[in-house]
Amino acid sequence: MKHGRFRFLVGALLPALVLHGVFVLSPYAQAFYLSLTDWTGVAGEANFVGAGNFARLGGDSLFLDAVRNNAVMLAVVPLVTIALGLFLASMLHLGGKDGRRPIAGAKGYQIVYFFPQLLSLVMIAVLWMFVYNPNTGLLNGALRAVGLDGLARSWLAEPSLALPAVMAVLVWSSVGFYMVLFSAAIDAIPRELYEAALLDGANNWAMFRRVTLPLVRDTVQVAFVYLGIGALDGFAVAQIMTVGPGGPDGATEVMGLTLWRTAFTFGKFGYASAMGVALFFAALTLAVLALRAGRKERIELA
Amino acid sequence: MNPSPSAKTYPRRRTILKALATTPLLSACVTSGNDDQPSSPTGAKSSQNPLGVKEDAPLEVVIFKGGYGDDYARKAEDLYKQRYPKATIDHKGIQKVGEALQPRFVANTPPDVVDNTGAGRLDLATLVGAKQLADLAELLDAPSFDDPNTKVRDTLLPGVVEDGTFDKQVLTLNFTYTVWGVWYSKSLFAGKGWTYPKTWDEMLALCATIKGAGIAPWTYQGKYPEYMNDPLLTMAAKTGGMDLVKAVDNLEPNAWKADGLKAAAEAFAELAAKGYIMAGSEALSHTESQAAWCQGKAAFIPCGSWLESEQKDVTPKGFDMVMGAVPSRTSGDKLSGAGVQATSSESFIVPAKAKNVAGGQEYLRILFSKQSARSFAETAGTLPAVAGATDGLTLSSGLGSVRDAVTAAGRDAFTYRFRTWYAPLAKAVDDATGELINKRATAAEWADRVQKAADAVAKDSSVKKYTR
Amino acid sequence: MRRALPHVAMLCWGVVTAFPLLWAVLSSFKTDQQILTDPWSLPTDPQFGNWARAWGEANIGRYLLNSLIVVGGALVLTMLLGSLVAYALARYEFLGNRLIYYVFVSAMFFPVFLALVPLFFVVRQLGLLDTYQGLILVYAAYAVPFTVFFLHSFFRTLPSEVAEAAFLDGCSHGAVFFRVMLPMARPGLVAVGIFNFLGLWNQYLLPMVLNTDPDRYVLVQGLANLSVSQGYRSDWSGLFAGLTIAMLPVLIAYVAFQRHIRAGMTAGAVK
């Protein structure tokens, strides 16, 4: 069997490894090299400038704006999305005589909630641009229709509102998916656990904390990783919707946008690569922390 | 080669090291752009074929398909085809020229002629710096397509050759002549008895009247604050004259703190402070704000001469849009009140490493003929950069006003160059102006910010510098 | 009261979710003037011309087909390679196992922007620029890491008794994988397949750089293009019609298949 085992492993791993090496690892490796040069993106000499590009990052106010905004998004978007998703998934299961079954129409709700997940962020951004339009948009129109004219705002043009407005779109686009995912996880929790908790006199909140939350923890963790990656991006939404784009005055600048502009508008591919490398280390650090935390929890549970 | 000591502690370190180890080999494919290509084919030169086009060489034309469409370019292709029936022409009309072509320039497989225009265009300075553009001198000195006795050079409007000159070489040829100003509806103004102001004081007085009539005096393309830069910088140039413009473009110390610029910034800050800008403008895209203006929600909007054709489908009948020159700020202005910012644009380039350089230049010779330019003016509603192309044509209200503005401005037509030379500075000015006209920055803060950005560009040794 | 609360909460989010979409559909039947002056009105005189314009000028039909080809091909390849790698790493102990796992999984956290320009060269050197095959390979390469990450833990939790019995019966390693383990992993495969499908379907950075031929545009590129040309031509109604045309098939397919999708997600959530 030993020989067959080796052959199988090679056959299973090699094609994927080749694909990975050619299309994923090698471009990243080249980008690392480029980040040490002043390459302008057009064929020609790329001069080695060492760490010069990295030294400039600290004084680049747009890049710093982008780092700050991505950090805010990373802190807010996954948390709010997961909280809303969990809340709605729990609400969905407060039906039936014992209050532990899916409510009437649960399936219909899940179908509708899932819709935004099916649309690309490009489409969503275009759509929300019209929603946020200060004069003819849906949002201000709705506020004015119910007499809340005072709350109508220039959502994407006020520095304090623009980033929350962008984050709201990201949350809107993903809540439904995670709600359906969590709902599936809750469905799989044995009913006896709830019944036991009920006998202990637990209320809904206590049952959520003591039964639901621990048992959907794995799913929540996957959700955090996935949403975290999304929050480090935000390029499509910022690029299409915001003033500038990335404004007003850097209020919605995200790293992808800075990198893109630096490369394709300013023609500084070396410097843009340095931004990408910095972003790479930021993401790597976060991922390591997340995986470490995950492993620790699993050990504790075991 | 270890990129960062902190990476050492992580399990993925080996991945990174492995990646770095393979770097030199692979990076060779990215930056080895100097491989000599076989020079592009040529045919015999003649009076019919002064540039020596190889008759059967295929021609690839990439056109920015924006407000003007790309039919005019196809018409010129038809003429090319008539002259060289053996040539096949590959036409592409696209929007994001930079995205589509940047990779092809890097790969040394650029098309033969490119209309490098639109928000997503290729950065010209970069292309110039990398010697990616063919010198057009031979084309300029060739006889024009319509008249063998006139050189192409002499058929172009003033400024066109200069606009395409980089370090004494003409590398781009701009097809349209764009003029910036402040637009209004002639019929609305006639109906209300308003006259377009010649000075800024008159402007403010008129704005008060307009606001009293229940109309917002100004709106602007808030999503892109650069639209508001144009009247601001025009006003400053009128006050300070060409010395101010050149100081700005040459990145001279404290150029942005000149009196003319400060006064202009104050003027536009005042416009905002007095509530003369339509509420919500700051979040509107160019199409949205221009549509609001066409609906009569605002009286003035700053824009270039393309506005009329851009608004063709949403302009009400009898609106009669016309463009006025930016009012003068002081009576001691160095340029006349009729002065306008004008520049040729829609830059056509012939990539140096194209497969058919001669064909690309010949295509431009045909495109810049009176015949092509005239048919462009008829459909595109924009002045072509070819002198006399609109003579005898009955122009629409907007285009007529643009032609008149060019005539009235005479020599006082000028342009700033920093936008094309230093893209990062342009971005900084846009952001600062957005803050200024939304009352989040004072004129002094505006000048400080922009000066700081200009100084940063001046200090940056990696940015190629230009002077004028 | 206690009964009503869940319904109120669900309805609220339902409205928030559905309304903008419904509004886009309605706007696709209006004229530009109606959209601009009265965004809340119902279309009085349905403008089917908007749809014709979007379909004809914007080639939405062709882009749909391109998307189906590329995403379909990439999905099959991703699932095959991803499940093989995940299974091999999850069920076999060998030197370098951990390293290979991290080589794949760490790529999930690489910002794609960083790779874009060099990636272009790699694809060009292989002569795969502007081809379906090139896009399929690149899509698959970028989707495999997540697939491995997801399925790795899934294969670990599968009981080993069945596989052991199969080995005793003389099955080869490959046969055990394809005949025994893969069917057992079906719920997980469906779940990760759905994740991958949505991710690939909506991918637009990669095609933007690697797929510049307008004839081969995938749907997202086509739409971005439409929204850009809207910027120059002021055709709001056409844009909404394009959005709706692109939106409806996916939504309808989803409603038709949602039971299977939900089953897959249940499997993914409970793995």
Image (cartoon, coloured by chain):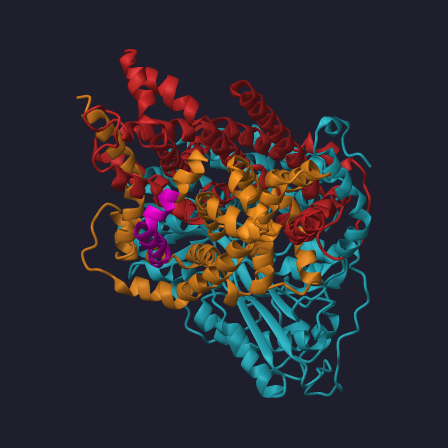
Exactly how many numbered labels are in the figure?
0
Q: Position of residue C25 (x, y in %)?
A: 29, 52
Quick one: which chain is red? A
B140 with respect to B328 (left or right): right
Which residue corresponds to the image point at 49% horizontal and 41% vertical from the top-left? A238
Q: Is residue C244 magenta?
A: yes
For residue B441, say whether it is visible: no
Quick one: which chain is cyan? B
Which quadrant holds residue B396? bottom left
Which residue corresponds to the image point at 31% horizontal and 17% vertical from the top-left? A196
Q: Position of residue B70 (x, y in %)?
A: 50, 69
- Rendered shade, chain C: orange
What segment carries the magenta color? C238-263
Q: Is residue B208 above or below residue C30?
A: above
Q: Position of residue C49 (x, y in %)?
A: 29, 65
Q: Quadrant of the N terminus of chain B?
A: top right
Which quadrant holds residue A55? top right
Q: Is residue B100 above or below residue C197?
A: below
Q: Position of residue B239 (x, y in %)?
A: 58, 42
